[in-house]
Each structure stands twice: as C-alpha cells, then as structure tokens.
Amino acid sequence: MARTPRLSPRFLARRTAIGIIKHSPESRAIAATIVALCTSETLPGHGDAMTILEPADARGVVTLVHVRQVRGLNLWIWYREAGDFLEIARLTNQPPGT
C-alpha cells in the first residue's frame, strides 16, 4: 500500500534547525526512510516506537505517533498514518523519551 507523505511545518523547521542540507547524505537517508515508510505493507514496522506527540491540541487531546530511526544516523522520524497519507510530524536528533 503506497501512502503519500505529508511533511509537517514542524518537521521542515526541525530539519533546517538540525542543519540538514539538501542533497547531503543525511538528506538522502531521511528521504529513503520516508519512502520506506510510505511503501511499507504494514505500519508500524519492527523496531518502530510509539510515543505521544507533544504538545496536546487546544482541547487537551494528545496524538499518538510512531517513531523510526533513520538508518545509520542519530535522526528520528515521527509519523502517523492518516488514511492514504503518512503525516511526517517531526524530526529529532534524539530518540523519543530523552
């Protein structure tokens, strides 16, 4: 099942803040991870963690997301399925819970 990625403003801002440069090895590794997520038969995948996306919305409702490490890097993609889309919610350079 192919899903269309939606890169959130938070993801894009963190990618810039972390210092990811277009066409760099890190940028290509992030893209490869997103493609793997979008084309995966089932999500979450083996090794993906579940966590809460902070902060809660205005009503106090929290969003559960899954997190996958970018292979070989200390980068973590936070995502959730939304129908035919895969929301790429956040990018961090620390695993969840740290």
Image (cartoon, rainbow, N blue to C red):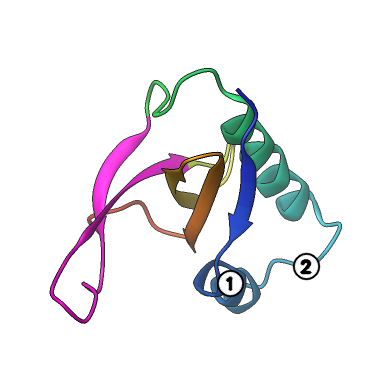
> For the residue marked with disc 1, what is the amino acid?
Ile
Q: Residues within 10 Å of mark 1 (few under 14, many from 20)?
A: few
Residue position marked by numbered label 2 in the rendering: 21
Q: Quadrant of the C terminus?
A: bottom left
Q: Tell me the amino acid under the disc marked 2.
A: Ile
Measuring 49% from the left and 50% from the top, which residue is drawn there?
77
Residue 23 visible? The answer is yes
Spot occupied by residue 14 in the image (x, y as percentages of width and height) = 54, 73
Residue 18: which disc?
1
Q: Is residue 74 visible?
A: no
Residue 72 is left or right of residue 76, and the answer is right
- Horizontal arrangement in the rendering, residue 80 relative to residue 41 (left or right): left
Q: Residue at x 82, y 57 (%)?
A: 24
Is residue 50 shown in magenta?
yes
Q: Residue at x 63, y 48 (%)?
A: 5
Measured in 3D between alpha carbons, the distance from the residue under mark 1 to the one under mark 2, in whole angstroms, is 9 Å
Q: On the picture, is 19 further left or further right than 55?
A: right
75 lies above or below 43 = below
Instruction: Estimate the x, y position of residue 35 in percent, counting from the top left.
Output: 68, 36
Specify start and end residues of the magenta stretch as a single range.
Answer: 48-68
Judge left or right: residue 15 versus residue 50.
right
Disc 1 is placed on an element classified as: helix
Residue 74: x %, y % from top left: 50, 50
In the picture shown, does residue 71 fall above or below 5? above
**Image quadrant of residue 46?**
top left
